[in-house]
Amino acid sequence: MKKTLILFIGLVLFLPSLSFAQSIDKALESLSKEYNFTYETLDKGDVYNERYLLWFEQELAPKNPDSKTFKQRVFISHRDVKKPVVFVTEGYWASYAEYPNYSNQISDILDANQIVVEHRFFPPSVPDSSVFDWKYLTIENAAMDHHRIIEVLKHIYKEKWLSTGISKGGQTAIYHKYFYPNDVAVSVPIVAPINFSTKEQRVFNFLKTVGTDDCRKKIKDFQIDLLKNKKEYLPIFKELAELNHQTYNKVGGVSKAYELTVFEYSFAFWQWGSSCDIIPDTKVTAKEKITNLDKISGINWISDQGIATQQPFFYQTMSEFGMYAYDISDFKPWVSYDENPQFTFTFPEGVDVVFKPEVHQKVDYFVRHEAKNMIFVVGEYDPWSSSSVDLTYSTNSLKFTKPGGSHTTRILNLPKQDKELLIKTLKDWMK
């Protein structure tokens, strides 16, 4: 009895230390003093054992020793230091990571720890107005942000790391892999393009062949109707814009905004996987047609308010990321534009933006000929798939295309055979 009691007491004394050993709170406390970041504990939710919000002090120009700094948000969702890490490179805000139960698909597939990083210059990871300068918003600087975060947190997580991101976040994962190929063992960019122009020709060609002839004709007929009968529809567009407090000064007025919103319809329709059955026909009222235009294209897309919200995105597309333009060859008799319009009207006020494709050209070569352990996921009908990477036989990287898939294509909605192969490959590479 005495021996049993001693064993029981010893077990009770051991349990708290076992639990303590799995926590990363003390490790964060120690690292924060050395690497200049602050942290706070978050509601852990139902999925992870611990969650933290970190604010990293990052240099605006990491290559400049006298650089000013800004604070960048990082969310850690912790399971166990002995498990791998899924590093999510967000291309925009990371506000969704505030939700306690947010978990990336790959984090669940691998039963991994999860780290989500908000992209520089997206609120609230924005430099103070006294040091803010658009020239610091570059592909390489963002990659250096991610490299520093990984360097610090690898003091805690010593198992394999995987990077992933969706859309612009997927592009961000590609860039980080290019600049720092040894930071992560595997990279999984999802629905991520690599554009070479601010008027990407591959998108033009894609929209001429995607889907069925009947569906493309129905889209074009609807666009022509909206442009040809602009006098009938524009007042309804204005009324809806006023109701939603949208203005269009940057684009050159509400009339031009209306035309651009109609041009956007085709791209947005295929991007988000809309059904051809929802395209209005001649029996539908004018108001219902504008409602449909708003549902697919979004009247806020190129409003002053929409541009202000997405300003870092627009700046990056027009400086390094590349972008599509609108092919108006079928609409010229009814529009005010003489040439295919680009997104130059989105430039920050007083800032000259010059597109520099050099980084994308180098990244594309790296991915096709040198990069290892990369998996690309795209949707067949997503216009961004037209400028997704074309793999060669030089590497072991894989590309999965979901038949009929849109920009909402993800690992878990791939066809069964592709999904199983992708997951098996992930687990093999992460062993």
Image: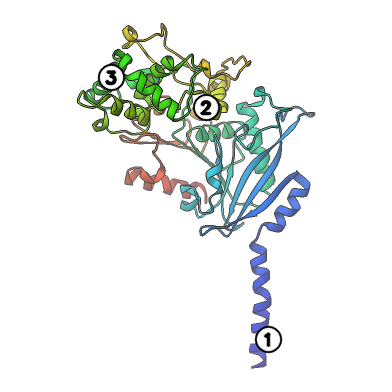
Q: Percent position (x, y) of residue 79?
A: 57, 57
Q: Percent position (x, y) of residue 87?
A: 57, 44
In front of the other: 313 or 366? 313
Left or right: 218, with 430 as reference point: left
Q: Residues within 10 Å of mark 2 (few under 14, many from 20)?
A: some
Question: Which secondary structure lies at badge 1?
Answer: helix
Q: Residues within 10 Å of mark 1 (few under 14, many from 20)?
A: few
Question: Which secondary structure lies at badge 3?
Answer: helix
Left or right: 39, with 229 as reference point: right
In front of the other: 418 or 312? 312
In front of the other: 124 or 11? 124
**In the image, what residue type sits under mark 2?**
Gln
Residue found at the very far bottom of the displayed protein:
1
Left or right: 32, with 266 as reference point: right
Q: Kindly report which numbered mark, 3 or 1, lies closer to the viewer in this rendering.
A: 3
Q: Quadrant of the N terminus?
A: bottom right
Q: What residue sits right under mark 1 in the picture?
A: 6
Question: Which secondary structure lies at badge 2?
Answer: helix
Which of the numbered marks, if any, corresponds to residue 220?
3
Q: Report the colour scheme.
A: rainbow
Disc with the residue nearer the chain's start (2 vs 1): 1
Q: CA distance from mark 2 to mark 1?
A: 69 Å
Q: Percent position (x, y) of residue 267?
A: 37, 24
| Residue under the image location 67 percent in, 92 percent down | 2
Which of the numbered marks, if any, corresponds to residue 305?
2
Dividing the picture into quarters, in which one does residue 72 lie?
Answer: top right
Q: Kindly report which numbered mark, 2 or 3, lies closer to the viewer in this rendering.
A: 2
